[in-house]
């Protein structure tokens, strides 16, 4: 990378408890010229908590293709830019991949500032084998694609973690029962690091039965064990 270039940082931010931010991340967010944020209102709360006043711009899934070139041109011109998502590590089911890919094409080497991730939190907390595991992101909403999604998980030889909307947790548990197996060990990790953090473990059928009438709330991750 040219010495005249600025720096592009991918900065992990807390997934709930703001005290989980790293000292390195705070230093970067203070020192850069601009922060590209998935939701500037959400990120502003984090910055206010730590008395950071760096300029914010919007950069999210709906505008990343339009804004990436201009953002990278700023880096090439010497501007230091930090990318943050609403929570966790950019590019993990959040904006970031496209920016990294295009940056590398232009000779810019992004610097990752590691920290909290809902995925790694869940892998550690689930109580299922994670010597190797796969991340499948969010399940499709349409029934046909959704069935194939869960059937593919059922054929894995490793544990699998997925993100899911709280409104579809029981549907996901039912999908696991139907397409993978009622006795498959499962963990539901809800509101990780937050006040109402909850980790539920059991078979898919047990968790479905015990929570059949539940109105789930908050961010949720589901871990599905190998056979």
Image: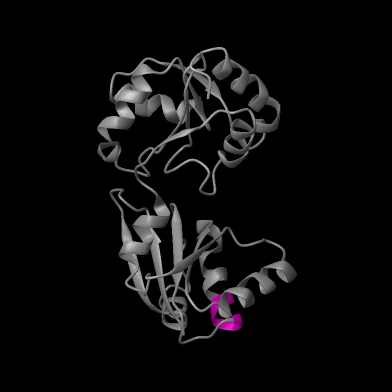
Extreme residue toward the right, this view: 144
Residue 180 highlighted magenta (yes or no):
no
State left or right for residue 211 relative to residue 103. left
Q: Toward the viewer: 83 or 166?
A: 83
Seen in the picture, residue 106 relative to 61 is either above or below; the reply is above
Give the residues drawn in magenta, as a range: 175-179
Colouring used for the render: one colour
- Can residue 120 be seen in the rendering of this structure? yes
Residue 157: x %, y % from top left: 51, 79
Dominant SS in magenta:
helix
Q: Toward the viewer: 220 or 2?
A: 2
Question: Could you tell me which residue is drawn at 57 percent across and 39 percent down?
Answer: 95
Question: Could you tell me which residue is drawn at 41 percent across and 18 percent down?
Answer: 32
Q: Toward the viewer: 164 or 2?
A: 2
Extreme residue toward the front, this view: 2
Residue 100: x %, y % from top left: 57, 36
- Can residue 214 be seen in the rendering of this structure? no
Question: Could you tell me which residue is drawn at 49 percent across and 18 percent down?
Answer: 6
Residue 111: x %, y % from top left: 44, 33
Residue 126: x %, y % from top left: 35, 68
Seen in the picture, residue 22 relative to 206 is either above or below; the reply is above
Seen in the picture, residue 162 relative to 48 is either above or below; the reply is below
Residue 178 highlighted magenta (yes or no):
yes
Question: Could you tell me which residue is drawn at 52 percent across and 17 percent down?
Answer: 5
State left or right for residue 45 relative to residue 66. left
Q: Please tell me in which quadrant of the rendered image residue 167 appears.
A: bottom right
Please tell me how many numbered marks the rendered image carries.
Answer: 0
Q: Please tell me in which quadrant of the rendered image residue 58 appears.
A: top right
């Amino acid at each position: 990378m040219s010495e005249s270039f600025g720096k592009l940082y991918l900065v992990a931010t807390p997934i709930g408890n703001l005290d989980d931010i790293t000292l390195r991340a705070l230093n970067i967010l203070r020192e850069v010229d601009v922060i590209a944020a998935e939701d500037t209102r959400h990120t502003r709360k984090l910055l206010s908590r730590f008395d950071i006043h760096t300029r914010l711009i919007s950069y999210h899934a709906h505008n990343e293709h339009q804004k990436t070139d201009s953002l990278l041109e700023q880096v090439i011109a010497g501007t230091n830019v930090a990318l943050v998502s609403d929570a966790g590590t950019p590019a993990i089911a959040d904006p970031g991949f496209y920016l990294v890919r295009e940056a590398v094409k232009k000779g810019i080497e992004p610097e990752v500032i590691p920290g909290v991730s809902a995925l790694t939190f869940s892998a550690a907390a689930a109580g299922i084998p994670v010597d190797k595991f796969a991340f499948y992101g969010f399940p499709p909403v349409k029934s046909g694609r959704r069935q194939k999604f869960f059937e593919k998980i059922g054929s894995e030889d490793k544990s699998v973690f997925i993100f899911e909307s709280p409104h579809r947790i029981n549907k996901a548990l039912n999908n696991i029962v139907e397409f993978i197996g009622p006795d498959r060990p499962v963990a539901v990790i809800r509101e990780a690091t937050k006040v109402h953090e909850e980790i539920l473990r059991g078979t898919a059928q047990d968790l479905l039965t015990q929570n059949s009438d539940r109105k789930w709330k908050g961010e949720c991750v589901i871990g599905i064990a190998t056979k």
